[in-house]
Amino acid sequence: MKPSAITKSLYFDTDIGMFHVNTNIVPEAKGEIRVSLLEKTPMLQLPTGMSVVRCRAALLQVSTMTPIKHITFSCTFKGSITASPCTGEYLDAQEWENSTNIVCVGTEDIEKLEMRQPFFASYNCAKPPITFSDNSIDIHLLNVPKNSELSMHFIIAENLLPEPTECSAWFAVDFPHSNL
């Protein structure tokens, strides 16, 4: 019998619309896989003069005793606004904005994931695991070996426009994983 996929979701309501954080894990074989997807509130320490209206995080933790064929971890905007990528050192992020609000969603880039987790340092795939579309940021992992421990996040920061200090939401999503 083929093992069942494991799916977990969180929803984040913002002033521009709903964001859906989802993970889908497809095991290679039957065996123990522990998965948690938690909503957290980061304790921000922004540079002087910067602030955001609200900041939340989705924290995914996976511990597997069996190989995993595929993991997808996504943050998808359910509205009609097109995102703009806004990456930086150790950060992959996208911004959605309307005339009065901005929402920035960020996660660690592959370089930071490699430094923090042994699995990523040996991860070799034809295409990068982190991808962007007009409405989402997605992390796709293939062939996760048994006895792996993985942890990833999305930070969702909201602000009014114009921001009190430019780039405040972007700085908010550049949050250390270890502080979640």
Image: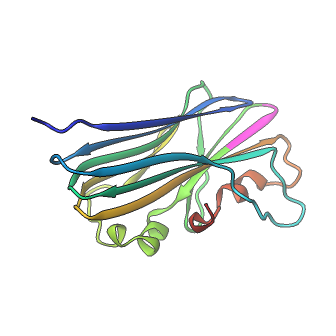
The single residue placed furthest to the top in the displayed view is 80
- Is 141 displayed left or right of 166 in the figure? left
Q: Toward the viewer: 109 or 58?
A: 58
- Is 69 displayed left or right of 119 in the figure? left
Confirm whether residue 172 shows in the render. Answer: yes
Q: How is the image coloured?
A: rainbow
Image coordinates for residue 81, horizontal then vertical, percent: 62, 29
Q: Toward the viewer: 149 or 173?
A: 149
- The residue under the point 48% across, 56% down is 152
Confirm whether residue 139 shows in the render. Answer: no
Image coordinates for residue 162, horizontal then vertical, percent: 86, 43
Q: Toward the viewer: 4 or 118?
A: 4
Quadrant of res 125: bottom left
Quarter of the image with the N terminus is top left
The single residue placed furthest to the left in the displayed view is 1
- The residue under the point 56% across, 27% down is 78
Quarter of the image with the C terminus is bottom right
- Is 48 displayed left or right of 3 in the figure? right
Image coordinates for residue 84, horizontal then vertical, percent: 60, 43
Q: Which residues are magenta?
A: 99-103
Q: Toward the viewer: 164 or 63?
A: 63
- By secondary structure, the bulk of the magenta-drawn segment is best described as strand
- The residue under the point 72% across, 59% down is 171
